[in-house]
Amino acid sequence: MPTEARATQSTAHPPLDQPVISLRGATASLGSRPVLRGIDLTVRRGEVVALLGANGSGKSTAVRSVVGQVPLSSGELTLFGTDLKRFRDWSRIGYVPQRTTAASGVPATVREVVSSGRLARTRFGLLRKADKAAVAAALAAVGMDAHADAPVSALSGGQHQRVLIARALAVEPELLIMDEPMAGVDLANQEVLADTLRGQVAAGVTVLLVLHELGPLEPLIDRAVVLRDGCVVHDGPPPEAVGQHALPGHDHVHPHAAHDAEPLRTGLLS
Amino acid sequence: MDLLNYAFMQRALIAAVLVGITAPAIGTYLVQRRQAVMGDGIGHVAMTGVALGFLMNTSPVWTATLVAVAGAVGMELIRSRGRTSGDIALAMLFYGGLAGGVMIINLAPGGSTANLTSYLFGSITTVSAADVTAVVILAAFVTAVTLGLRRQLFAVCQDEEFARVTGLPVRALNLLLAVTAAVTVTVAMRIVGLLLVSAMMVIPVAAAQRVTRGFTATLSVAMAIGVLVSLSGTVTTYYLDAPSGGTIVLLAIAVFVTTTALSAPLAKRRANAARSAEAVCTRDDVKV
């Protein structure tokens, strides 16, 4: 990914210790059910924070409230130091919603879907040379450049996630927010995604991601926040593997391997 | 081509081309967000507008446009709330619109439901010069929105939540899409009729996506199919003296059957091509 745009932007916002995301005492309900019961979540520039928890613990609601998609019933949220209500700089954020598919009712190519992620940086939706280059770089970052003109309906589950992540990367974000990017992704594709993320982190991108388990991403995670029943029960170094297994409701079959092996840059897919 | 010598045929053919362009253009977005029946609902609601035109003795195209726009905005508000009772609310709107049209037409001086037939099923002989002017203006609006904002509308119809986080004005775009769909209904009303409008929004798109792989390709092929069937349908109608809507829609279905038959051999050819492409990219990977 080209980084000049990001570099100039970060110098334009001097307070480097200022949190990129600051959520204070956040509560939220879905229907009449309280899902967040007063959580605090701070993500600083350059950090990679994993949000962990069992199904129904509120981790997905927490990230959706961070991007303004679930209204908070109380609490405070600032993004890049700006209150959510006044925040307009959406081109600084790349968002990967929880999805199993990138397809819709009409065929679309991988490039078309990824290009839609670039809209925040285009004027009137026109794709200039720099926009096309950013889309191409995003496709390359997830290793989907060879499939750019393939219809998304023909992709495997893991490839769908790679397309959704490329769509978020197309805007060249400073902050990447991902909701369960590893769900339903086989080990080979998980390795590709871990590699993509490593590249982003090296380029200085801040990451908040919801995970069911750390898996091949474990070495990248600076801090883990564990939720249980809408409350933060752990905020610190990533729990030992045991930590997650002990979570209530843990019911996952692990695609073990890989993370003791040295990180593979290429080859797993070839 | 003696039919071109008749002024009414010239008007009908102009209207037909515009229907062929606009209905599949807006239809592509409706199909993309799996809202294919929306055009049908707007068609029902527009009945009230047509009848109001008769009652007030003004052009039914403009009154139908106003009522259809109001109905479409209502439908969009119901959809965006996402309530479970939304289904019922939509049904009320659809049938209320149809029933309102039937009631009001009987209040109009000398009016009866017979007046509505040409609006329900389309008719090439009744397209007036004023209708053509109205249809040209409305079609220009529909084309400007569906082609000019295609990237934004694509994003909104593809993944609404993602589009909101991109900072797009999703609510405004959704309303614009609903208004554009309503306007398209009144563009198509004279030629294909209110009951068959939705068919021209959906069938060319369904036919196109049998053979296309991308969104822009689907949009363009659907519009080409739309123009092809609405023009040939209008000409056929001239010789057969049948309601134009029925002829056009049957032709569209024939194209759908044809592209469906073509899709299997086409998919096979593409799979073979993709396999050889895969081989090339594997070699590249090894070099890195």
Image (cartoon, coloured by chain):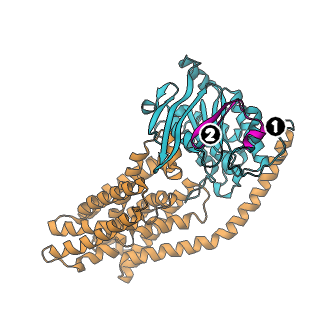
Chain colours: A cyan, B orange
Compare marks 2 and 1 and give the one earlier in the sequence: 2
| Residue A211 shown in magenta | no
Q: Residue at x 24, y 70 (%)?
A: B100
Q: Are marks 2 and 1 in contact (CB under 8 Å)?
A: no
Q: Residue at x 75, y 56 (%)?
A: B274
Q: Which mark is residue A265?
A: 1
Return the x and y of residue B243 as percentages of the image width and height.
Answer: 35, 79
Q: Name the secondary structure under disc 2.
A: strand
The three-letter amino acid code for the residue at tag 2 is Leu
Q: Residue at x 56, y 42 (%)?
A: A230
Front residue of B241/B42: it is B42
- Above or below residue B81? Residue A135 is above
Marks 2 and 1 sit apart, C-alpha to C-alpha, by 32 Å
**Which quadrant of the figure contains the C terminus of chain B?**
top right
Return the x and y of residue B159 as percentages of the image width and height.
Answer: 53, 50
Q: Which residues are magenta?
A: A221-244
Q: Residue at x 81, y 37 (%)?
A: A265
- Above or below residue A122? Residue B48 is below
